[in-house]
Amino acid sequence: MKIDILTLFLEMFDAINNSILERAVKNKLLEINYINIRDFSKDKHKKVDDTPFGGGAGMVMTCQPLFDAINSILTEEEKQNKDLCQIIYMSPKGERLEQKIVTNLAKLEHLIIVCGHYEGIDQRVIDHFDMQEISIGDYVLTGGELPAMVLCDAVARYVEGVLSEGSTEEESFSNGLLEYPQYTKPRAYNGLVVPEILFGGNHQEIANWQHQESLKLTRKRRPDLYRKYQKSLKNSKK
Ligand SMILES: C[S@@+](CC[C@H](N)C(=O)[O-])C[C@H]1O[C@@H](n2cnc3c(N)ncnc32)[C@H](O)[C@@H]1O
């Protein structure tokens, strides 16, 4: 998979050039390119923003550098067929990022992620390129770089070969529930002990216990997910 990130703050992305993502890039499972939007500005001072029409505080990122940057990345084929490349704008006004969006994006060959700044980007860029707007939550950050890193990390985990087989199958949200509690050695730590059932060697009993713990946790912390899970169970029995 190829991910092109358009940003004004390239240095911020050092934060994701570590651990699993770094290995995925080295192993050529993932290609991540960082494009400086400012490099495309035709303004003699390399300006990329201007005051908003209609008034109001702050600045808006202008069309020209963004149009030119995106057009420089898209292949002729991608310009003709919009299904070949998904262009995403990280935005608090977008659809809230969820596992379903992540797994769908992980199936694509090419993503372009645009990071906004100031008051955001000129609406004509969003409309022209038919961008998918994605939010990482109901709060406003100063820029789209942290949201873009969140999206990249989440999507990369689902690219084939990035994680060991089965790693994403039994974790939170994979079956609609939150994951059960995890324990590791030692068996007792300062008087705190691991539930006895995990040492019985009965795989079925352990799986049942883990499922019950998942249900309990989801019901308590995420009643919305719990209701959805119960509903899907009912529908599958029909
Ligand atoms: C200060 S914000 C702009 C907020 C915008 N004026 C509004 O009220 O919706 C600057 C940039 O940060 C990014 N951003 C901020 N919060 C975000 C969020 N919750 N999810 C995704 N991107 C976000 C977007 O790229 C946005 O263009």
Image (tube, grey):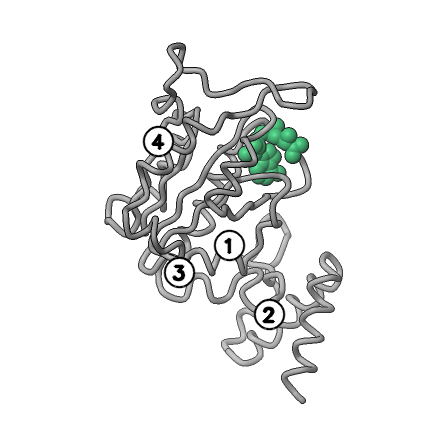
Q: CA distance from mark 1 to mark 4?
A: 47 Å
In terms of sequence position, does the residue under pointer 1 or pointer 3 come before the other?
Answer: 3
Residue 171 lies, in percent from the top left, at: 53, 61
The kind of residue on which mark 4 rests is: Ile
Q: CA distance from mark 2 to mark 4?
A: 45 Å
Front tag of 3 and 2: 3
Kindly state the secondary structure of the residue where label 4 is placed. Answer: strand
In terms of sequence position, does the residue under pointer 1 or pointer 4 come before the other?
Answer: 4
Q: Which residue is mark 2?
A: 210
The one of 81 and 212 positioned closer to us in this rendering? 81
Q: Quadrant of residue 152?
A: top left
The one of 122 and 216 positioned closer to us in this rendering? 122
Residue contact at pointers 3 and 2, CB within 8 angstroms: no
Residue 107's disc is 3
Residue 144 lies, in percent from the top left, at: 52, 33
Report whether residue 141 is seen.
Answer: no
The kind of residue on which mark 2 rests is: Gln
Q: Is residue 42 above or below residue 5?
A: above
Kindly state the secondary structure of the residue where label 3 is placed. Answer: loop
Residue contact at pointers 3 and 4, CB within 8 angstroms: no
Q: Quadrant of ligand 1?
A: top right
Q: Residues within 10 Å of mark 4 (few under 14, many from 20)?
A: some
Q: Which residue is mark 1?
A: 186
Q: Quadrant of residue 66?
A: top left
Q: Which residue is mark 4?
A: 35
Q: Quadrant of residue 233?
A: bottom right
Front tag of 2 and 4: 4
